[in-house]
Image: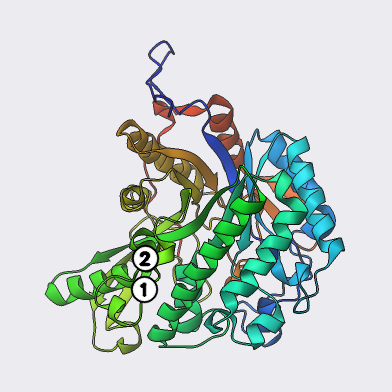
């Protein structure tokens, strides 16, 4: 890894990143493509989007992704993560759509033409209706079905992609779908099923990892892990429930890849998967927030943990019915130190804040990158930072309520406007670092209702 140095010859101290550091953005197919037909489309039809919004054309990527690729190129970005929508590629079980694969091939070629490295994600929360209707990742044969999908993708576009993410945030998928009821299939309190889903996803990850290495000689394969800091309140009970949430949310999938089994006591629940041990070439980290935790007997559904965000801490725009989370750049350090135990290169695959008025996003970007620079100087093998996201998109249950883009989008007209944070990020990317004077004090918070 290239040495990180302090550029003393410049007029002011400068935080310089490694020579080949990958600067980019991350996206997700359902949120940007428009006109989807997957289990999230059915969730929307059932009236489960909190804001009442509809996805519609989203960012119109299926017809015109190249418009945003031009923006990424003009910003100087070197990497763009996108997911390939399983439901488009295999709309019916066993039938693969060559036109969909050809469109994805066009997208990847378009990125290469613009000098942008594509990072392909195979599962970013969405999959075909037929797969959902038959149990999704509770199916015993789900790993084999995911492997078959992976092989078709690799044969179609493998020559255009080196970096592969099998699953985006398997912990979020399991927790929100089977414990909190916030994502399809909308179940609540099914902890054992959530753990089972993650074990089956880990097995699917292994089969996809092997298939990709078989079919794509220079493949680099990992997954993207969401990592949240749970800050306990006063008292032993609060510390205990915060530790439990940390163990269940942050460490379950890590444990499966690191040791091939769930950590104690959950490993007693048939939590072995030895073949997953060490089965990754890199670790992707999605890092956003810190939540505060207090023991409260009224919150039995969340293991007696009241999870909240104090009003005085830095935070972006609130969600439809609750704060999104404390904007906490230091969470990156905790996540990196956890991931370092696998001994693999690390990429920050997502980091951002919902902020329509761009009030704290500039502070978040420079604060996160200062944190990263310090970690690299300590010797951590961090090879890239991908901001979430390029253009405002359809934010799952929140619809158009939360705006994460460096570029503002009017979904009705598809008009795009660069925010000031886009220009700041572009300057950082082009300079491969930032001046120390770029740092700014954190605002206490955005205005909350």
Quadrant of residue 155 within the rendered picture: bottom right
Residue at x 69% of width, y 41% of height: 72
Q: Position of residue 392 (x, y in %)?
A: 65, 56
Label 1 CA crowd tier, 10 Å (few <14, some 14–19, many 20+): some
145 or 239: which is nearer to us?
A: 145
Residue 31 appearing in the image: no
Quadrant of residue 35 within the rendered picture: bottom right
Task: From the image, tell me which residue sits under label 2.
Answer: 260
Task: From the image, tell me which residue sits under label 1.
Answer: 272
409 or 371: which is nearer to us?
A: 371
Residue 189 appearing in the image: yes
Quadrant of residue 84 within the rendered picture: bottom right
Relative to 30, 370 lies left or right: left
Q: CA distance from mark 2 to mark 1?
A: 6 Å
Under tag 2, what secondary structure?
loop
43 or 272: which is nearer to us?
A: 272
Farthest residue, direction left:
236
Under tag 1, what secondary structure?
loop
Residue at x 29% of width, y 69% of height: 247
Residue 256, placed above or below residue 50: above
Farthest residue, direction top:
9
Residue at x 71% of width, y 50% of height: 158
Q: Which mark is residue 23?
A: none
Number of marks present in the image shown: 2
CB contact under 8 Å: marks 2 and 1: yes
């Amino acid at each position: 890894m290239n040495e990180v140095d302090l550029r003393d010859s410049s007029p002011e101290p400068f935080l310089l990143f490694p020579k080949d550091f990958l600067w980019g953005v991350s996206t997700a197919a359902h949120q940007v493509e428009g006109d989807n037909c997957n289990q999230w489309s059915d969730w929307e039809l059932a009236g489960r989007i909190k804001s009442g919004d509809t996805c519609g054309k989203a960012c119109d990527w299926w017809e015109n992704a190249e418009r945003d690729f031009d923006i990424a190129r003009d910003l100087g970005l070197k990497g763009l993560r996108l997911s390939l929508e399983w439901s488009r590629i295999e709309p019916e079980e066993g039938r693969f759509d060559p036109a969909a694969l050809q469109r994805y091939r066009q997208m990847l070629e378009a990125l290469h033409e613009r000098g942008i490295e594509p990072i392909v994600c195979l599962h970013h929360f969405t999959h075909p209706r037929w797969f959902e209707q038959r149990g999704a990742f509770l199916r015993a044969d789900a790993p084999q079905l995911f492997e078959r999908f992976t092989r078709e993708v690799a044969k179609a576009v493998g020559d255009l992609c080196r970096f592969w993410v099998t699953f985006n945030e398997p912990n979020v998928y399991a927790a929100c779908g089977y414990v909190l009821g916030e994502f399809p299939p909308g179940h609540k309190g099914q902890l054992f099923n959530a753990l089972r889903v993650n074990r089956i996803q880990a097995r699917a990850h292994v089969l996809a990892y092997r298939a990709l290495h078989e079919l794509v000689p220079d493949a680099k394969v990992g997954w993207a892990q969401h990592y949240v800091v749970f800050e306990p309140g006063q008292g032993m009970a609060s510390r205990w429930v915060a530790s439990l949430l940390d163990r269940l949310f942050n460490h379950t999938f890590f444990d499966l890849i690191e040791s091939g089994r769930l950590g104690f006591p959950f490993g007693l629940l048939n939590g072995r998967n030895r073949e997953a041990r060490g089965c990754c070439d890199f670790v992707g980290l999605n890092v956003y927030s810190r939540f505060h935790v207090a023991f409260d007997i009224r919150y039995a559904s969340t293991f007696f943990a009241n999870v909240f965000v104090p009003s005085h801490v830095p935070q972006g725009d609130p969600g439809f019915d609750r704060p999104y989370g404390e904007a906490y750049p230091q969470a990156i350090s905790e996540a990196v130190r956890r991931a370092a135990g696998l001994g693999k290169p690390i990429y920050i695959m997502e980091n951002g804040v919902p902020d329509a008025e761009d009030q704290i996003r500039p502070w978040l970007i420079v604060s996160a990158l200062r944190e990263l620079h310090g970690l690299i100087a300590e010797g951590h093998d961090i090879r890239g930072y991908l901001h979430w996201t390029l253009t405002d998109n359809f934010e799952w249950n929140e619809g158009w309520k939360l705006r994460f883009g460096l570029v503002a989008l009017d979904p009705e007209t598809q008009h795009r406007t660069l925010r000031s944070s886009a220009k700041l990020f572009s300057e950082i990317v082009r300079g491969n670092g930032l001046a120390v004077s770029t740092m700014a004090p954190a605002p206490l918070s955005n205005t909350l209702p």
